[in-house]
Image (spheres, grey):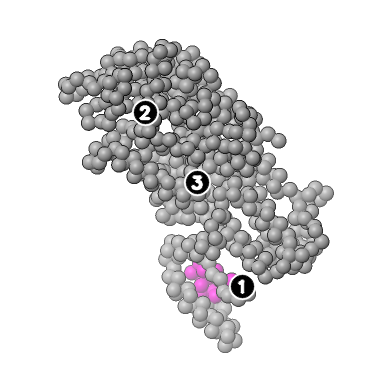
């Protein structure tokens, strides 16, 4: 079955048909590195991380390119505020980006080009656009201090590219009436955008045929995507906010230069709201990834992001991230239990398969198939997570010896072990695609316990002490006292479970 992806350009789901299968080239717009990443970034890069992981799971040979915008007005302003070089600011936030992505288990892209390392390529493309009369050179705007400008500006002539507006579904005449407010007399058309900008005093610059200057924002993505993936990309992605003007301009630059289609599929992830309001700095509901992962396990944030389809608006609430944290804990608890069950019970049985045991009537239970169906349908992660939950429930039925509830008969422990081993084989590839449950379970559960103790103001040492007293009471056969302590802990939010050799506790 084909993998179907919603294409912003055609406004419907299309089969992924790579130009040169099994090779797939995907370019995703990266961050401008002047500040910490926020939840909107987390959403975009987790969404495309799933795309990358699933394409590889499907046996496709993916080259994933994600850039860093390491020169830009915002970086220059931040550098000025701090009295640092723009390159220092950029490097700092590239490092911070990696830290956040690692926490969210977002794998690096295969190629991560930076604008400042591609200036000659950018100049070459701008020259080509000028030669083809899609670009034109104008005098730079006057410098405020009256000194001579360091170079000239180059603009892209939007009127020279007939399909302009197709991706965003905008009509060029309508756009123009909206753009009249800010008329720059030097431009042929108010919609024309900068390909190259003359350097202002104190700004970083590079020598070019138009004097000292630096690239406009949009040109970098045309240059870096085509350099590494060829003139036609299989997939181009980014946040919905980039459709216009950024991606519209990328198409114009690239197709005007090469005369070939730029991207076959355009994927865009939806916005993030916070408590049903648009996330914005002015509303004070603006969260960086760092803010959120200080309060919740990063994997809970990842899980939470996957609970909504990547194209739908996502509503961020603490309650929902906390719920996601419970789901992740359930994954790790189950993995730990399966591991310990298999360490104690050798699998044996008559060769019955998991699919047959958990058959649905005459139909075998085929979770792997259902998982692939979900992700083949435009990466439907909420449905994939539903399947994961169902598998976790079945594992716990086996672990609890309650399989009778599901299949109407009781199995012997060696057969349960066999099915659990089978379960592991089913579950592991799904985990890998979703990027969940990759840490050692004990490590995750210990960290979560401490995090929750801190959140609920419970002293772990107090819990340990009460548990020791409860063990002593049980040893002395004072079951009333033991039950009292258990109830006291429960009232504080501590759940106690007596396993075979030791007592396990967790904070609910
Ligand atoms: Zn871009």
Ligand 1 within 8 Å of disc 2? The answer is no
Q: Residue at x 75, y 67 (%)?
A: 414
- Which dot marks residue 119? 2
Query: From mark 2 to mark 3, how far is it between C-alphas?
Result: 28 Å
Does residue 454 lie above or below 372 as drawn? Answer: below
Q: Residue at x 40, y 26 (%)?
A: 121
Query: From mark 3 to mark 1, how far is it between C-alphas?
Result: 35 Å
The answer to which of marks 2 and 3 sits earlier in the sequence is 3
The crowd level at tag 3 (other Cα within 10 Å; few <14, some 14-19, many 20+) is many
The answer to which of marks 1 and 2 sits earlier in the sequence is 2
**What residue would you read off at disc 1?**
499
Q: Position of residue 481 (x, y in %)?
A: 54, 82
* Cβ atoms under marks 2 and 3 closer than 8 Å: no
Helix, strand or loop status at disc 1: loop
Q: Which residues are magenta?
A: 486-498
Q: Residue at x 37, y 26 (%)?
A: 120
Q: Position of residue 468 (x, y in %)?
A: 51, 80
Helix, strand or loop status at disc 2: helix
Q: Is residue 11 magenta?
A: no
Ligand 1 within 8 Å of disc 3? The answer is no
- Which dot marks residue 106? 3
Q: Residue at x 31, y 22 (%)?
A: 208
In the image, is 101 to the left or to the right of 141?
A: right
Does residue 241 lie above or below 159 as drawn? Answer: below
Q: Is residue 496 magenta?
A: yes
**Can residue 448 be seen at all in this image of the molecule?**
yes
């Amino acid at each position: 079955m084909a993998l179907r992806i919603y294409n912003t350009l055609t406004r419907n789901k299309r089969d992924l048909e790579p130009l040169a299968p099994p090779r797939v080239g995907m370019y995703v717009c990266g961050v401008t590195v002047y500040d910490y990443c926020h939840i909107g970034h987390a959403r975009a890069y987790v969404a495309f991380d799933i795309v990358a992981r699933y394409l590889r799971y499907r046996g496709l040979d993916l080259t994933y390119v994600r850039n860093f915008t390491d020169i830009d007005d915002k970086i220059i302003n931040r550098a000025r505020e701090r009295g640092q070089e723009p390159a220092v600011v950029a490097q700092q936030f590239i490092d911070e980006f990696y830290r956040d992505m690692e926490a969210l288990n977002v794998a690096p892209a295969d190629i991560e080009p930076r604008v400042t390392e591609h200036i000659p390529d950018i100049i070459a493309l701008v020259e080509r656009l000028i030669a083809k009369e899609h670009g034109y050179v104008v005098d730079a705007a006057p410098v405020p201090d009256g000194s001579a400008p360091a170079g000239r500006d180059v603009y892209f002539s939007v009127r020279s590219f007939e399909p302009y507006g197709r991706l965003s579904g905008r009509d060029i005449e309508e756009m123009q009436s909206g753009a009249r407010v800010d008329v720059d007399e030097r431009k042929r058309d108010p919609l024309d955008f900068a390909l190259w900008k003359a350097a202002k005093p104190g700004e970083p610059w590079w020598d070019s045929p138009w004097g000292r200057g630096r690239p406009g924002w949009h040109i970098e993505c045309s240059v870096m995507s085509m350099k590494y993936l060829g003139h036609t990309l299989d997939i181009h992605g980014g946040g919905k906010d980039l459709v216009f003007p950024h991606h519209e301009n990328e198409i114009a630059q690239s197709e005007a230069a090469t005369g070939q289609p730029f991207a076959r599929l355009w994927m865009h992830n939806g916005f993030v709201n916070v408590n049903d309001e648009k996330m914005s700095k002015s509303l004070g509901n603006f969260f960086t990834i760092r803010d959120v992962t200080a309060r919740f396990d990063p994997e809970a944030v990842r899980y939470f992001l996957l609970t909504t389809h990547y194209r739908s608006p996502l509503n961020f609430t603490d309650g929902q991230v906390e719920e996601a944290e419970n789901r992740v804990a359930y994954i790790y608890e189950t993995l730990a239990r399966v591991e310990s069950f298999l360490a104690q019970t050798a699998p044996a049985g008559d060769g019955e398969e998991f699919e047959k045991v958990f058959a649905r009537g005459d139909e075998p239970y085929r979770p792997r198939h259902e998982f692939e169906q979900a992700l083949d349908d435009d990466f439907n992660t909420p449905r994939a997570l539903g399947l994961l939950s169902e598998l976790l429930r079945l594992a716990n039925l086996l672990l609890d010896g309650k399989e009778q509830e599901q299949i109407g008969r009781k199995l012997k422990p060696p057969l349960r072990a066999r099915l659990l081993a089978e379960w592991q084989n089913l579950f592991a590839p799904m985990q890998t695609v979703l990027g969940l449950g990759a840490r050692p379970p004990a490590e995750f559960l210990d960290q979560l316990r401490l995090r929750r103790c801190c959140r609920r103001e419970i002293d772990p040492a107090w819990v340990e002490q009460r548990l020791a007293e409860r063990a002593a009471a049980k040893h002395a056969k004072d079951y009333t006292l033991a039950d009292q302590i258990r109830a006291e802990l429960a009232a504080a939010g501590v759940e106690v479970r007596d396993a075979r050799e030791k007592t396990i506790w967790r904070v609910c």
